[in-house]
Image: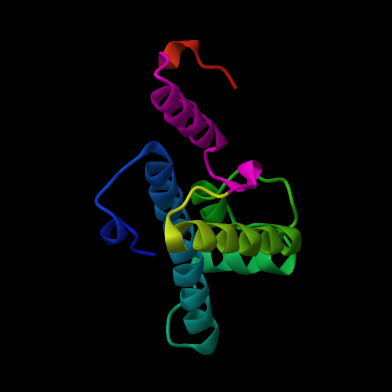
Amino acid sequence: MDIRSKTKERPPDIIVCIQECERMNILLSEIRTSLVELHMGLSGALNITEAMEKLQGSLMTNRVPETWEVVAYFSKKSLTLWYADLLERVTQLEKWSSDLVLPKSLWISGLFNPMSFLTSVMQITARAKGLPLDNMVV
């Protein structure tokens, strides 16, 4: 998702949207790369590495692979539930980034960094009402 070219303005909510999309793209890239490599290893095009064996073991035992966890959001869910959750997060980011309008309703815990979103809401409110940011609370 290249959303930087959609607007020249960078209000706090757009910055958060961009950051969330960047982190999601890193996660999706890691998932895609590791699965392609595993597929190539299993088909004989590459030598099977220890990382591929660990990935295969995680997939077979319904656990989120360690290499994905490193770049992902915190979760204790099994791989199946984690993946369903991932799809919902991607859908939310796609909707938010498509028109770059702050949603009326947002799944805050579906963000990589929920506090950055809350801080952006406080910044927008403080600017709109002419209040000091230090006086804003969530």
- For the image, the number of numbered tags is 0
Q: Which residue is drawn at 43% across and 87% down?
A: 45
Q: Residue at x 39, y 46 (%)?
A: 14
Residue 134, relative to residue 109: is it above or below? above
Residue 50, relative to residue 131: is it above or below? below
**Rendering coords of residue 132 (x, y %):** 41, 13
Camera-side residue: 106 or 104?
104
Q: Please indicate whether residue 42 sits to the left or right of residue 62 in the image.
A: left
Quarter where residue 80 is shown: bottom right
The quarter of the rendered structure image containing the N terminus is: bottom left
The quarter of the rendered structure image containing the C terminus is: top right
Q: How does the figure colour the protein chain or chains?
A: rainbow
Q: Please indicate whether residue 119 sits to the left or right of residue 56 in the image.
A: left
Residue 110, relative to residue 92: is it above or below? above
The question of residue 39 being in magenta is answered with no
Q: Please indicate whether residue 63 sits to the left or right of residue 122 in the image.
A: right
The magenta segment is: 104-132
Q: Note whether residue 132 is visible.
A: yes
The question of residue 124 being in magenta is answered with yes
Camera-side residue: 13 or 104?
104
Q: Residue at x 47, y 27 (%)?
A: 125
Q: Is the magenta stretch mostly helix, strand or loop?
A: helix
Camera-side residue: 88 or 68?
88
Q: Which residue is drawn at 51% across and 65% down?
A: 31
Q: Which residue lies furthest to the front in this view?
A: 129
Q: Note whether residue 54 is visible.
A: no
**Rendering coords of residue 71 (x, y %):** 49, 50
Residue 98, relative to residue 46: is it above or below? above
**Rendering coords of residue 73 (x, y %):** 57, 46
**Rendering coords of residue 69 (x, y %):** 57, 50
Camera-side residue: 75 or 48?
75
